[in-house]
Image (cartoon, grey):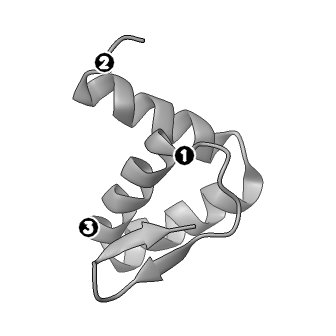
Amino acid sequence: MAILKKKDKREKGLEAINGHKGKRKVYEAYKKQNPEMAEEYIKFHSKQPDAVYITWDKDKERFTS
């Protein structure tokens, strides 16, 4: 398995987000309200593109499923 570069990871995350109406809507809301959280949303979906029900862990400052 090849190691993905940052750009490839970001593209994989965006592909998962844009391929799903609900994820895209959530991402757009994060972009407006909190751009840093939007980036974390992309990172999460680059690692787990099939995740559906995710939450924000305030203590760890990251998304979990």
Mark 1: give few (<14), some (14-19) or many (20+) Cα within 10 Å.
some
Tag nearer the camera, 2 or 3: 2
The residue beneath circle 2 is 3
Q: Tell me, for residue 48, which label it has, or none.
A: 1
Q: From the viewer's perspective, is 36 left or right of 33?
A: left
Front residue of 56/33: it is 56
The tag earlier along the polypeptide, 2 or 3, is 2
SS at circle 1:
loop
Residue pictured at 50% horizontal, 48% vertical = 45
Question: Which quadrant of the figure contains the C terminus?
Answer: bottom right
State yes or no: discs 2 and 1 in contact (Cβ < 8 Å). no
Q: CA gap, disc 2 to disc 1? A: 15 Å
Question: Which quadrant of the figure contains the N terminus?
Answer: top left
Residue pictured at 52% horizontal, 62% vertical = 27
Front residue of 58/32: it is 58
Q: Amino acid at mark 1?
A: Gln
Q: Amino acid at mark 2?
A: Ile
Q: From the viewer's perspective, is 9 left or right of 14?
A: left
The residue beneath circle 3 is 36
Residue 15 position in % (x across, y down): 57, 34
Residue extending farthest bottom:
59
Q: From the viewer's perspective, is 11 left or right of 29?
A: left
Residue 41 position in % (x across, y down): 43, 59
Tag nearer the camera, 3 or 1: 1
State yes or no: discs 2 and 3 in contact (Cβ < 8 Å). no
Residue pictured at 24% horizontal, 30% vertical = 6
Q: From the viewer's perspective, is 48 left or right of 6?
A: right
Q: CA gap, disc 2 to disc 3? A: 24 Å
The tag earlier along the polypeptide, 2 or 1, is 2
Q: Amino acid at mark 3?
A: Glu
Residue pictured at 51% horizontal, 72% vertical = 29
Q: CA gap, disc 3 to disc 1? A: 18 Å
